[in-house]
Image (cartoon, grey):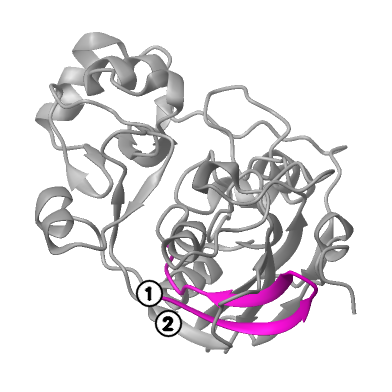
């Protein structure tokens, strides 16, 4: 069996889950989908699901498929790939804004995963699924920055455990309005799927929201690195981030990211995405994978807002 993970897109939101599964797994059919449901091999956001459930945008649907039905990320050996660190066990790459981390459907190309398996074919047998070869974590399409991938199964297991425990450290740089922002702090607001807008996540500030929407606990720490005029450059950390966590949390304290239209961030002329960049990946090391640390500076499309 190989587990495949699919993110529900806006156009698929509201579909019955069995129809969604049939649409994303070529050749499965309704009978095959029903069998997988009966065997408990389909989950939504980590919980066992049933065919009558409704898929909503942003849900992660995990399907345990027979190996013969598990499609691979299409290798693209000639695809551009910015490698920042490489050993026999691990690769750290820099993903540009606008590039998806992994394909959502069979045959899709142009993602970071396609480039990785094209450069490192051994990754095809490593990871959560052949769609995500070696990938320890993912970034939103419009978030730029560092992504770590494993080249061996042993490294994948170690780094995945490290991500959950905090031994694999990640940090982000963001830009938001400086006025009224504390120099540092922690945002501990649980997050749920938005009850009305399927593109968004929802910060549950009121106890009734917690009772109604059953959010997941989430914690983001931040510190201001520097300010320039009306803008602040902020370093944020979220060890095991929920979808859109940093964006949602900053918006919840009245400081949405510059350019983040989804969460009412201030528009910036010439900025075509939200101002979030994955700037640090650091591993403390263990018996299998040696310690490493990789940093990435703020890219030019964000750096002009907060120059030195």
Q: Nearer the viewer, residue 298 or 136?
A: 298
Q: Quadrant of residue 86?
A: bottom right
The label nearer to you, 1 versus 2, is 2
Mark 1: give few (<14), some (14-19) or many (20+) Cα within 10 Å.
some
Q: Is residue 249 above or below residue 170?
A: above
Tag shown at residue 5: none
Packing grade of label 2 (10 A; few <14, some 14-19, many >=20) is: few
Q: Is residue 77 left or right of residue 14?
A: right
**Residue lying at 27% horizontally and 67% vertically, measured from the top left:** 217
User: What residue do we see at 73% from left, 32% from top?
Assistant: 110
- Residue 263 or residue 55, whichever sits in front: 263
Q: Residue at x 63, y 25 (%)?
A: 108
Q: Look at mark 2 in the image and give the residue it sits on.
A: 186
- The answer to whether mark 1 and mark 2 are in CB contact below 8 A is yes
Residue annotated with mark 1: 219
N-terminal of the two: label 1 or label 2? 2
Span highlighted in magenta in the image: 220-241
Inter-mark Cα distance, 1 to 2: 7 Å
Q: Secondary structure at mark 2?
A: strand
Counting from the top left corner in percent of width and height, residue 15 is at 28, 17
């Amino acid at each position: 069996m190989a587990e495949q993970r699919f993110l529900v897109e806006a156009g698929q939101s509201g579909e019955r889950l069995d129809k969604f599964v049939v649409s994303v797994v070529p050749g499965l059919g309704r009978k095959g989908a029903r069998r997988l449901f009966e065997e408990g091999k389909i989950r939504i956001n980590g919980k066992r699901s049933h065919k009558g459930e409704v898929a909503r945008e942003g849900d992660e649907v995990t399907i345990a498929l027979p190996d013969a039905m598990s499609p691979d990320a299409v290798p693209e050996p000639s695809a551009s790939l910015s490698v920042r660190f490489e050993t026999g066990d691990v690769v750290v790459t820099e993903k540009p804004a606008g590039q998806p981390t992994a394909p959502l459907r069979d045959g899709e190309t142009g993602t970071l995963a396609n480039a990785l398996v094209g450069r490192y074919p051994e990754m095809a047998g490593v990871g959560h699924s052949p769609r995500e070869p070696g990938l320890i974590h993912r970034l939103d399409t419009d978030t730029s920055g560092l992504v770590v991938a494993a080249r061996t199964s042993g490294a994948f297991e170690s780094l995945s455990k490290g991500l959950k425990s905090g031994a694999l450290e990640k940090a982000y740089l963001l830009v938001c309005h400086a006025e009224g922002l504390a120099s540092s702090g922690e945002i501990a607001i649980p997050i749920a799927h938005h009850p009305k807008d399927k593109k968004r996540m929802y910060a549950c500030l009121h106890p009734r929201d917690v009772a109604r929407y059953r959010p997941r606990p989430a914690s983001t720490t931040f510190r201001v690195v520097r300010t320039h005029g009306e803008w602040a450059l902020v370093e944020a950390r979220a060890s095991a981030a929920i979808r859109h966590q940093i964006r949602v949390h900053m918006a919840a304290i009245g400081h949405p990211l510059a350019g983040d239209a989804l969460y009412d961030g201030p528009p910036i002329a010439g900025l075509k995405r939200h101002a979030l960049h994955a700037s640090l990946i650091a591993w403390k090391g263990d018996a299998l994978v040696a310690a490493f640390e990789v940093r990435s500076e703020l890219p030019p499309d964000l750096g002009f807002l907060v120059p030195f």
